[in-house]
Amino acid sequence: MRRILQMLRELRRYPSAMGGLALIGALIGVSIYAIIAIPYPEAIRLWRGGAGVWDDNPRNAAPVWTDLFTGDRLPRTIIVDTTKGATKTVTPLPDGKNRVEFTLKFDYPYDRFPSEIILFAQAVAGTEAAGRTRYSVLWRFPNGQEYQVAANRSMRASDNYYISQDMSLVQNLGATGEYALFTDMAMKAVPVKERVPLKGEYTVLIRAEVPAEADFNAKLVVYGRIHGLAGTDHRRRDLTVALLWGTPLALVFGLLGAVGTTMVTFVLSGIGTWFGRWVDALFQRITQVNMVIPTLPVLIMIGTFYNRSLWLMLGVYMALSIFGGGMVTYRAMFLQAKEAPYIEAARAYGAKNMRIVFRYLLPRIIPVLLPSFVLIVPAFVFLEAGLAVLGLGDPILPTWGKVINDAQSQDALYKGYYYWVVEPALLLMITGFAFSMVGYALDRVFNPRLRTV
Amino acid sequence: MRGGNALRFLRYTAVRAVTQGLAVVVALYLTILIVNMGGRLDNIRRSEIRLAVATSITTNPANAELPPSVINQMIEERTQLEYRRLGLDRNFFIRSFDYLTTALSLSLGRAENLFSDSGSREVRRIIAERLPSTLILFGTANLIIFFGTLWVGLALSRRYGTWVDRLVVSLAPTSAAPGWFYGIFLLLIFAAVLRVLPWGGMVSAPPPENRWLYAASVLQHMILPVTAMVLGSFFSGAYGRRTFFLIFSSEDYVDLAKAKGLSSRALQNRYILRPTLPTIITGFVLMVIGLWFGAIILETVFNWPGVGRLYYQATQSSDTPVVVGVMVVYGYLLAISVFMLDFIYGIVDPRVRVTGGTQRRL
């Protein structure tokens, strides 16, 4: 054991190993941060993203730092809410209803058009019997022009008014809302690509007629084109959740897989070699059969027909790789080690079988085992990603592979949402490289034949 | 003595062939059990068949006037008929041996949902149609990787410690990422940003009439997947070979040969390559096996119409005969690879020849 520790200390001489260890340390740090900052149930809730969770996020928005690479100022999401800092006037109407008027103001300083506009309207404490709420929206441009976006729109308890999908805007202003409401109305005939956003202060006047004793609130969201540190996906989810939480999941998956398969194979092949006879023969036959069963197709089959849970996949993969190539390699090493004089000495003083296997036989091979154990971690990390790319990712867990899969299925590369693919891919690559840098250095330290040359 | 050796070698080969054959049978039967997954797949298929039958009967205008009870009875009868056509009415245990014998004899049966491009339902045809495209892609990539790493490894082992050597050593960790992963990056660079190479597929649409243009188009489509595969395993391969050759060139007999004044070519061929041949061959066969597995994801990323993609489509449409068929082909290919390995070992590795079949490869 002391010898192994001493060898590990020797790792310090390899800059690549230190770099790899630093990266692994950073990944562990990110994992701890992710688990503390977003507790597990919260992460699952956010990633499932039901109604109301991500409503204020733009779809497919690039990360905010893309701003640094484009000369233009890209729009961020602007949210104006009638409950927050809007002027409000209430006037009673002769028919017993109330007229509620709001003036919402926001500044638009960006060089590109927003991606979408939605008005979320909400009637407060209105009773069904008292009648419906009706509201109108008047849009005032910075240059003083005005446009009636909606007139006497009727609603019950709530209404999501998708302004960018309102075809009347296309008819009247020649473009969908996110373009038409941000250009000079005189540019009606100009195609969208040639338009430039009108900068300045916009005013939105909302006038609602609500039944007595009821109230009305509205939230206007002008969705930007950049959002958060990592951007968002097609379901408006903030990718930081998946990128952060993907880290502990990838590490746990990789380490569990590597520890599980290597240790079990190692111990079993040690026992098999030591006891020989039928135990050894049985293990060899199982290995022979197992080598003919293709692993990935079996995993795909189980994922498709049975269950896509990450942990089930890991279990099946481990079960299939225990009796794999490692069994053959370790067996050859153990066969040599078994003949060593010190083993004979142990036998001579009457050591029990299990004592010999665990105290003398197995430790002898650990130096060979350690590098291959570290080198196998990336294989597991990429296995998860690969399964996810095939659409067999875990149904609820936010993993990097699933982000790539979402991006692939939404043709992210074709549509130019590069960040969506590059971010998880880079993280995968960093994880893979970190472990393999350490692994190769360990290989050089622990393999004495490599050191002499 | 020579005759005795030949006999021993024959026995060794025969024993290996028989055990390998048995392994295939057992593995295939296990596969069939896994495919069925405790009757789960049967249930999926039954409900799919029932749905298809019900849709076809209820949407048929000729049946519009019939009362619901008659329609239900029709659905029931037709479903049972369909079950019998597909053998679903029999016990799974019997069916499993049915599957096994058809699978082993490579007759493979008929697909339930998928068609071959020529419109055939025969699993054998469907697979045979996809095999060439898999072979052309993976054959090319494998050969490049195998001979490339061998050559680079040999060259580096003689230039130990130079900057090229150090470069390859420091690039070795890049192989931690698999080929499909580099494929995504390559698609990003060459298809999305630069728009110089195709997004995927095997040939441009519509396929060129001219044979040469067709070949050129296939080649163009192969650039990215082959590059991806090479990136995914080249540097660690070269590193491994280099280290391996370094160890062998530090043996005493190599020093002796050097002292005798042999040319470096003779030294390389006779004293470095010859003793390392078994390991090199193992590496080749193991790589072939490994790339078979990686093929499914890579083919999916590049939309390559190969066997891996077919397998994936078959699982998605729960087409058992095709799934089993592809597994059979994989199983046979793996078994043949492993057997070839043992066979070649018997020829090239003196240790195996001497001990005559009792020793497993080291």
Image (spheres, grey):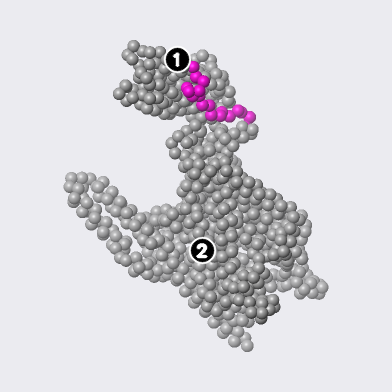
Numbered label attached to residue A320 = 2
Q: Is residue B47 above or below residue A403?
A: below
Are labels 1 and 2 assigned to the same chain?
A: yes
Q: Which residues are magenta?
A: A70-87
Q: Nearer the viewer, residue B32 or A195?
A: B32
Which residue, given by chain and number where applicable, does mark 1 sit on? A89
Amino acid, disc 1:
Thr
* Foreground: disc 1 or disc 2: 1
Percent across and percent down for residue A229 are: 59, 37
Is residue A19 shown left or right of residue B287? right
Q: Nearer the viewer, residue A80 or A451?
A: A80
The residue most toward the bottom is: B1
Element class at badge 1: strand
Based on the displayed image, in which of its 4 quarters is residue A322 positioned? bottom right
How crowded pointer 1 is (Cα within 10 Å; few <14, some 14-19, many 20+) is rated as few
Is B131 colored magenta in this rendering?
no
Based on the displayed image, in which of its 4 quarters is residue A304 positioned? bottom left
Tell me what residue is drawn at x 41 percent, y 56 percent. A305
